[in-house]
Each structure stands twice: as C-alpha cells, then as structure tokens.
Image (cartoon, helix red, strand yellow):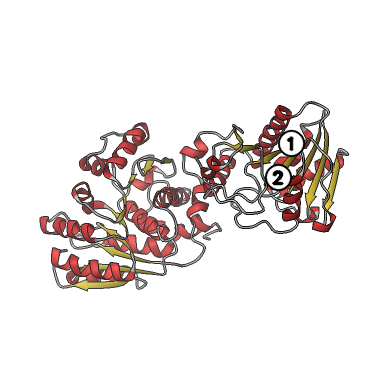
Amino acid sequence: MITGERMAAVDENAAALGVSQKQLMESSGNAVARAVREVADRGSSVAVVAGRGNNGGDAFVAARFLESYDVTTLLLGPAENIGTEIARENWEALQHAGYDTHEIADSSGFELPDCDVVVDAMLGTGISGELREPAATAAEAINAADATVVAVDVPSGFDADAGAVADNAVEADRVVTFHDAKPGLAELDCELAVADIGIPAAAERDVGPGDVSLAEPDGREGRAYVIGGGPYTGAPALAAQAALRTGAELSFVAAPDAVAGEIQGYAEDLIVQPYESEILTPEVAEDLLETATSYDNVVVIGPGLGTDEETLEAARRFLSGYDGRAVVDADALEVVPEVETDATLVCTPNRGELARMGGPDADDLAAVADEIEDFAAELGHVVLAKGENDVISDGERTRISRSGTVGMKVGGTGDTLAGIVAALLEGAEPVDAAAAGAHVNGLAGERLAECHEHGFLASELLEELPPTLWGGDDE
C-alpha cells in the first residue's frame, strides 16, 4: 500500500534516477488503454472525461493508444489552465494529430456522448470532499450513463488514503491504479488493477529528493530542546544549531551550569538553560521532563551527556516519563532497549552503538537492512543507523540513504543529524523525518566536499543545511 503523498515522493525520486514523469505518464496511459481494451471490443465508443492535472494527462496518453476505438476526449476547463507541462504536451499531441477533443468551459457546456466506455480522469489522489463544478455535473452524467466506467488511479470524489467517498463521486466499474494499491481502494466495490509503470525499486527503497520534499518545512515552526553537555560541549551546540538551520523557531540547550557558558559561546542564537549539577541527574531529569512536556518540545537527548551511571539513570527516568517526540543520540542510546515509554523515539546510533543496543553488528549497514528492520520492530521505535549508507526503519518501512562523503567521518556530523531530524519531526512522520534528515545531512556534506574533500568540519555543515533543504546557492 502507498499513500498519495508517498506516491508523489516516489515519482520525484524516480525522476532523480533518470525515469522522468513524462515516461511514467506514457506507461500509465498505456495501462489505462489496456484496461479499456479488456472491457470493450475494437470499434467501441469511448468518452474520456479529463481534468487539468496529471490524471488527465494519463488519459490523454490513453487516447493515443486506442486508435482502433471511437474516442472522444472532453477536457474540463480551458486548455490554457492545464496544470503541468507534461499533461499540456500530451493534450497538444492530441490536437496536432487530429483527435476528437473538446474543451468544456463550464458545467452548462458538458454533454456526455453516447458511449460504451467512460474513462474517468477528472481528479486523482489527494482530492477529498464533494465534487465541485464542472466535475459534479460530469460525474452525474457518468453515473447515469449506460457505459462501463474505468477510473484512472482513483474514481473522482474518492479519497484514496482515507477511503472516504463523496456523495456525488463517480461510481467506477474498474479502477486502474499505478505502482501500488492506495490504502482506501479496498473499500470500493469494483475491479481493481495495479499497473506496473516502470518505477525502479530504488525510487521507493532509497532516500531521494522526493523524501526531502515530503518532510520539508514550509516555514519556521517548533522548538528543539537539546538535553546534553557535561563532559562534552560541542555536541549539544551543533545539534541545537542544526535544528535552527532546519526550520526550528527556537533552540534550547539544557546543560550543567559549569559548561553552560561555553555552550552559549558557540552561538548567540541558542537559549541555554543551565542547571545546578555537574552532570545530568535523575532529579534534574524530572525538572526537564516537566519543561519539555509543558511546552510540547521536540527533544534531543544524548549529545555530550557522558556515560556516568547517574546520568544514564537520568536518561532512563526522562524517557520513561516522556510521551512526546524525541531524538535519542550518542550516550543516551544504550538505555533505550530497557525503557518502557509512550514517547515517539527516533534513535540515531552509529554502527558500534547499534550493536551495543542489540542490533546487527556489520560494516555494511545496507547489507543488513532487513535485520535492522527486525530490530526496529522489536525495539518499537524508529532506528536511523548511521554508516557509509544510512538505514532508516520503523519496523515496517525501511529506507536507505546513500548520500554523504568520506569526509563526514569527522566528529560532530551525527550531532548535526540529530538536530536536523528534531526540526523535521515538527511536521513530518518519524520515519519520513529520519529519512529526509539523513539525506539532507549527507547532501550538505557532499556540497562541502566539492571544495574540501576531506578537510571540512561538522560546524561547516550548518551553513549548508538551508540551501540543501530548500534549494538555492550559498555563495
């Protein structure tokens, strides 16, 4: 099963791999034409009712593959308002080749011709609620017609993710969906065909630009709350700054009083909250828990904490009482397998930390991705295992991020990753935030490697994060 949002991400990943959306549209349209041929003999009349999106573009392609049928294509709305370039190109191909096409300016101009088959390509996935004009009038005519209705991807007026059906939705006899079934389609009482349109498996398995688009913040939102520092001060500062660079409104660091000033010295943008203890203690953890819960912060716990037994007990205490979202990194990771918590955790171990937590011990994490998936399922939390190739899994979905460079072996890049994921957790699902975070962190390293192949520092990643995430040039 795949949601509409995830399908859009996979399409974008496929394009990055060299399989363009135009190629996919050609395959999709061919699949729709095959479905029509299965329900009607040659010479039958076919009415294609198309919207102005890529759903309509699929149907324009289908019309070209139905040369032995009497096909009329009706476009709802003016052609100048077709929403994508590839859909427009396929509409224009029908025009130039002399196919029977009509633009329907408004609902008063809609008239469904007598036909044996109707291809419903008005609206695709991601559309919910009652149909509006002119689609509403078209749907009423389609439902009243004595014709077999073939829907492209989903019937118009049907929410493919939630399974909700509008009162005036198209009643399809057959649905041709692409790549994978959509979650709600099982609720429909009609024939369902899932067409393979040539999307590479890597577009779904490997993290790519579509995953970044899926998790990308559309503005500043959320407050990262980094619990770290003590023996080490750079790690929490890097994590907190990375969260700011990735869209967080504010970034707090809770740290021992003795090192709070040093952490503040890394960046005036951080809000450092000192506590009166040389290390994190269970008593301090109780106070921090109250703060994190009351402000609904996304927590990062672990960077620079150290492994004092009292500190580990404090991490246990915090996580067992927390029910929000948290990235668990570095020294705090070892307590996760023994903690029962209602929190939503993203754990970010490196190879050694993964093995110590009870996961697989391997040099090549991608080679043991299935074992990491099993470990994540047993753990009950998202695992982002860091290596030459990062593996991300929630126990059901597993992704591999292949971005990065050998120069990222420098200390601190895992801390920037923790901060990135924390910021993305504000608006994205945990596994999506983790996958996108790993990819963005690696791509930022690749940008630096263009100038400094091996000699860059983790702190230099910070300036590369905004252009990597949102595009643009940092020069």
Q: Give the image location of residue 284, x and y in percent.
A: 17, 68
Q: Is residue 35 above or below residue 257?
A: above
Q: Nearer the viewer, residue 55 or 128?
A: 128
Q: Give the image location of residue 295, x and y in percent.
A: 33, 70
The residue that appears at 54% across and 37% down in the rendered structure is 180
70 sits left or right of 201 in the view: right
440 sits left or right of 93 in the view: left
**Dot placed on the residue nearer the N-terminal end, 2 or 1:** 1
Q: Nearer the viewer, residue 453 or 79?
A: 79
Q: Give the image location of residue 81, x and y in percent.
A: 76, 56
Q: Amino acid at mark 1?
A: Ala
Badge 1 is on which residue? 62
Q: Nearer the viewer, residue 320 or 410?
A: 320
Count of labels in the image? 2
Q: Which mark is residue 420?
A: none
Q: Is residue 302 visible?
A: yes
Q: Nearer the viewer, residue 307 or 408?
A: 307
Residue found at the far right of this picture: 98
Mark 2 crowd level (few <14, some 14–19, many ≥20, 10 Å Cα)? many
The alpha-carbon separation of the residues under discs 2 and 1 comes to 10 Å
Residue found at the far left of this picture: 309
Picture quarter containing residue 155? Answer: top right
The residue that appears at 62% across and 44% down in the rendered structure is 154
SS class of the residue under badge 1? helix
The residue that appears at 20% across and 51% down in the rendered structure is 339
Mark 1 crowd level (few <14, some 14–19, many ≥20, 10 Å Cα)? many
Badge 2 is on which residue? 121
- Asked whether disc 2 touches disc 1, contact meaning CB atoms under 8 Å apart, the reply is yes
Q: Is residue 106 visible?
A: no
Q: Amino acid at mark 2?
A: Ala
SS class of the residue under badge 2? strand
Q: Give the image location of residue 163, x and y in percent.
A: 54, 48
